[in-house]
Amino acid sequence: MIPRRAFLTGLGGAVLGLPFLEALQGREASANIPERIKRLIIVYTSNGTVMRDWLPDETGKNFTVPRILSGFDTPRLRPKLSVLSGIEMASAKMQGANGHAAGMTSLLTGRNFSEVKNTEFGNIGWGAGISIDQEIARHVAAANQLPSIQCGVQTQRQYQNFYSYMCYGEGGGANNAIASEDDPKKVWDRLFQNVPDPSKTLSDMQREVDQRRSVIDMAASDFASLKGKLGKDDNERLDKHLTLLRGLEKRIIVGEYCDRPDRGTIADNDIQKNQYFPEILTTQMDLIASAMACDVTRVATLQLSTAQSGVNYKKLLDNTDGWTRPTDTYHHGISHDAVPTSQIKDADEVQLAAVEKMARIGTWLGDQIAYLANALDSYEDAPGETVLDNTAILWVTEVSEGPSHRFDDMPYVLLGDLGGALQTGHHAFGNTETHNNLFVTLGKAMGIEDFDTFGDPQFCNGAISSLLA
């Protein structure tokens, strides 16, 4: 397991008098209770899913993990997996709206879009309010900490408009849209440029340890010289001080450190090339996991492509036998060659082939998110706990299924319980719940007080109690 951050323990002050020592004992007792740091990661993928291969047949704890979620069916991840079906993205249901635009702009804001324009493909606009990642980040960020990080994989390759943005600052709109950073080198710079090199950090800290021990030795020598010059009660007090000093000296050690990850080597002119999609994705996930483990930030988003994604998965996946039609190689095109699960029984050969391609893409995407979860699980957070134990990963998309552009039954996946704050390991059917309510639930689980509404109030009536522990 990988250690996560550098620190010194028992770093008492230089003046070791009686009041200090008594105060130190009190602080030491409280310091033995570790702080539980909670973290949230939201992962976006495009064009919905295939409900036939995503939705479990059973609700409750003992559901069979479906094909698209098979990457989570491991002894470590399965107990942390919750499938959330039946939740509607009510704020995306706008008369005359372009389906992908409405879904993308409502995705994390929980509001109808604003700055509306009419097009031949339906009305379009921009997110009309702050996104949930930004709202939670401003509540949970520690002092002098990066509130959040927005990582992307080829989010600026196609559109550079509302299809490409899912995060918004206060007030929303085009002027407050927050781009996901597609270049891992720039993500590294933002996260780790000010984090010291671990080898240098350890050397510097060892010197500090030696200096602090020297101060303790001098204090102990001064106390010892007083022996025999004081009365019985004072000598007993000095003996206690000396015992505490020697105990303090033993506790001054170099502890775990934050092992800064590599910066990445993908050339600037390769960042938007289709063939580098998997490599960039893996690098971004490693950076997020390291940042969470080092407590550089506690909120992250990972955006894979855009609404109406044009990623060519035929060139990325191993199992693409039969992908012969040119229009069937691009993600958005495949989604419209397919049919919704409700119409599969009447589908023709081409439509069935497209459904199968969408299922393979969805399975690959699920495997990538499982990689992120396992990366988080490789870092120790506290004795007996990993970073994953205190994290929640929410997997979202802008439409339920690509061919129908539905918002009634959004395919949400939640992985992790935020240190026991969330119920996990089950298939929960939401029925009348909205994704606004889901976001309120996450805010409460992150420990935000009085977090009772988010987004447009008409779409929110509070947390989903069955998800809270």
Image (tube, rainbow, N blue to C red):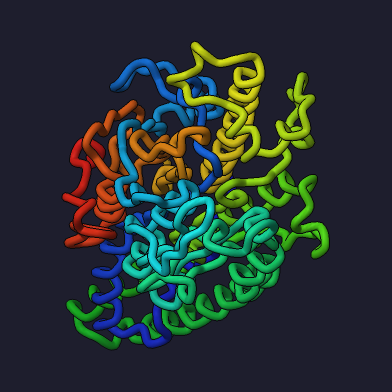
Q: Residue furthest front?
A: 120
Q: How many marks?
A: 0
Q: Is residue 239 left or right of residue 12?
A: left
Name the image quarter holding the N terminus: top right
Quick one: which residue is furthest to the top in this view? 345
Residue 128 on image: x %, y %: 37, 66
Q: Residue at horizontal 46%, vertical 34%?
A: 404
Residue 344 in sight in this render: yes
In front: 455, or 421? 455
Q: Considering the image in quadrants, where does the C terminus appear?
A: top left
> Residue 223 sits in which quadrant?
bottom left
Q: Where does residue 62 sit, x and y in percent of width and height?
A: 34, 17
**Front-lying residue, 65 or 35:** 65
Q: Is residue 212 above or below residue 110?
A: below
On the image, the x and y values in percent for residue 28 come to 31, 66
Residue displayed at 57% across by 77% down: 208
Can you tell which quarter of the image residue 238 is in? bottom left
Query: On the rendered structure, is 125 left or right of 434?
Result: right
Residue at position x 65%, y 73% in the image = 193
Q: Is residue 440 above or below residue 83?
A: below
In the foreground, 324 or 208: 324
Q: Residue at x 48, y 25 (%)?
A: 340
Residue 245 visible to the viewer: no
